[in-house]
Image (cartoon, rainbow, N blue to C red):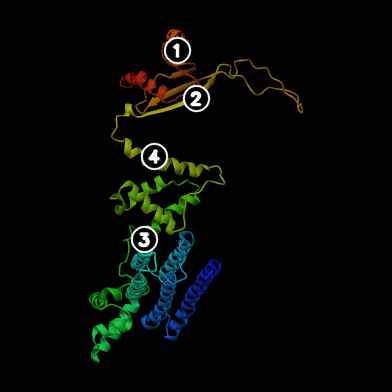
Amino acid sequence: MPIDTRRRLRLAVVGVLAVVEVTARSLQTLLVQPLKHLAGDPEIHVPVFVAFVESASFVLSMAVWLTFCLATNTKVEIRNWRYRLPMYCCLAVLDGMAVITASIGRSLLPAIPFTLIGALSMTFTLMLHSIFKTKQFPIHQKIAGCFTVLSVLALFVFKAEADADADRSTHLLSITNADKLAILMCWRRASVQGTSLHNFADANGVAPSQIRRWKKLETRLSQSRPDATTISRGRAPTFTEQEEDDLLRWIFDRRDAGIGISLNSLKQYACEMFSGLKEKSSSAKESTLRRFLKRHRLTTRVCTHSSSVGPEQERRLAGTFMASIVPRIASLDKRLIINMDETAVFFDMSRNRTIDRVGARHVNMRKTSSSTLRVTVAVAVTASGSILRPMIIFKGQPQGRIATRELPEYPPGSEYACQPHAWMDGATMQQWVKKVSPSVWHDH
């Protein structure tokens, strides 16, 4: 036979086998669902119909694989590996299609033995092709064919068992508590009529051990949710319904009053009011409160509108603050309770108002060049009534010329320091504490 004719024959065989493969897969997809509906209920386990259609489709795919394998060993075989290698690649593709598509909709675990056996079959066949390259050893054709047939039979058995296990597992996972109780009721009726447990379990697509377990847990099943698939009631709630209502009322009252609420303030209030939250760690408390907010469709928002606080509300806020702070400082020495404030003092305290004609468009005032220069003055007083020495902060480097040469010559009675921006920062605050703390204990 001419070489060109052989090539065309090879391509034709590959094309026809590919069409048969696709047709087999399509028939499987089109026939399985209608057969399930013919059984009366799509949810009922129908291993006979499903196994028949899927197994027939799988056998057809393996027959395609076998036919192509044997076709590569006939008299039309091309000796050159440049032509024979594409044929083996097509063989591997068809084998992979048969293995993977046969397990569509299943677990990946049943596909493992299919893939291993198919790969071993293909590898053994290719090995025989490499060893017996001449026509003087036609026995390799028979060995390859027998091994392929055995592979097909093994794949068929493994597939039937895996399909039954996968369908049973899927069915068991989808049974609700109400269905479990219904199966138990049917089992009691069937047992009176003499039906064995194994036959009843096979007829309903469940395992006998499952029925025995449901019988032991029948009381808990009846107390669980009917639409649930487990008897677990989930996480125990941290707050009772009354506690959640109280917490929501507190949030809404502060929201209506225009008072900001942070997660920390919510956590502090919840720990003070509800003892069940105190025993948890800080992260567990935050997680509990976040779930509470999410459950009630609440979240942290940025303020979009602000308004001034009225006198009555100011008094209420001051009372709330005093009620929270007084118990904390009641046991402290009054000399250790210090109220400090800081303010800017400009070198030239120029006015921004003057007297001029009514209706004048421009009102001019002269200011000195030092009108924007300032210092920061920090003043403090203790709860015992003692006034601490003020601290004056100038603009300059802490170890610069002003701090080392000029400040020591300033009059006593105040503390002096330098800061690049004349601010009260952390370092300046520590300096103030070191300089002022001796006078705190001095009894004026």
The answer to the question of whether label 4 and label 2 lie on touching residues, with beta carbons closer than 8 A, is no
User: What whole-number distance in Å separates the C-alpha atoms at marks 1 and 4?
Assistant: 40 Å
Q: Which residue is mark 2?
A: 343
Q: Amino acid at mark 3?
A: Gln
**262 relative to 372 in the view: left or right:** left
The answer to the question of whether label 4 and label 3 lie on touching residues, with beta carbons closer than 8 A, is no
Label 2 element class: strand
Res 129 seen here: yes
Sequence order check, earlier mark of 2 and 1: 2
Callout 3 environment at 10 Å: few (<14), some (14 to 19), or many (20+)? few
Residue 403: image tag = 1
Looking at the image, residue 274 lies above or below residue 400: below
Q: Which residue is mark 3?
A: 242
Callout 2 environment at 10 Å: few (<14), some (14 to 19), or many (20+)? few
Q: Quadrant of residue 292?
A: bottom left
Sequence order check, earlier mark of 1 and 4: 4
